[in-house]
Image (cartoon, rainbow, N blue to C red):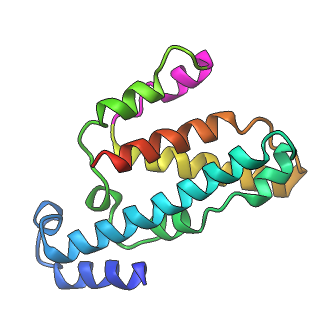
Amino acid sequence: MLEALATNLVVSCFDKTWSQISKTQEASLVRCAARDRLQRELRLNLEVWKLTRRSASSEQLAELLSMDAFDEVMSLSAPLKVLFLKNALSAKAIEYLLRDNIDKRFKKWSANINNEVELVERTWYRLRVLKVRRKINGSVGSLAYLMHLHEALDIALKGK
């Protein structure tokens, strides 16, 4: 359904610039649908993480994490900058990404995430790499940074 909405958006607005398209009613509907779908998946993954992180291995957790919504959003014909904010992240999301009580590597890796588009892309990328590593050699390592990104994206999507 999301793909159909995005395709209709692109077709109906073919002669407009992306900044004009992003202000249309169709764009608003696609934006709302994409953000809601992603937020549901983020919350599901976070809940799975919280429920199983002490009792399941990282490899088992990797199998349980969903990325259907991320794949759907990333494959849309509409650019991410139409669906997500390309302006600065909310203060709460930045504060969460760079807070003091996290692994210093997380701060370093997150330092150049400046807006929702970059945060969505980074989260999808890390989730996709996790799934590929699991398929190739079975090892996935720690999921802490991925869940850190999930939390930050959930905060960012709630704030807008």
Indicate the quadrant where residue 57 lies: top right
Rendering coords of residue 32 (x, y %): 31, 67
**Does the magenta-highlighted stretch encompass residue 111?**
yes
Rendering coords of residue 37 (x, y %): 45, 67
Residue 141 lies left or right of residue 138; in this view the side is left
Indicate the quadrant where residue 24 lies: bottom left
- Image point (79%, 51%), residue name: 61
Q: Which residues are magenta?
A: 103-114
Residue 80 lies left or right of residue 64; in this view the side is left
Indicate the quadrant where residue 109 lies: top right
Residue 101 lies left or right of residue 133; in this view the side is left
Residue 65 lies left or right of residue 1; in this view the side is right
Rendering coords of residue 101 (x, y %): 56, 16
- Image point (11%, 77%), residue name: 15
Residue occupying the far front of the picture: 51
Observer-nearest of 149 and 159: 159
Give the quarter of the figure containing the N terminus.
bottom left
Observer-nearest of 47 and 136: 47
Vertical relation: 151 (above or below) 127: above
Q: How many marks?
A: 0
Vertical relation: 53 (above or below) 67: above
Rendering coords of residue 5 (x, y %): 33, 82
- Image point (46%, 22%), residue name: 98
Vertical relation: 69 (above or below) 133: below
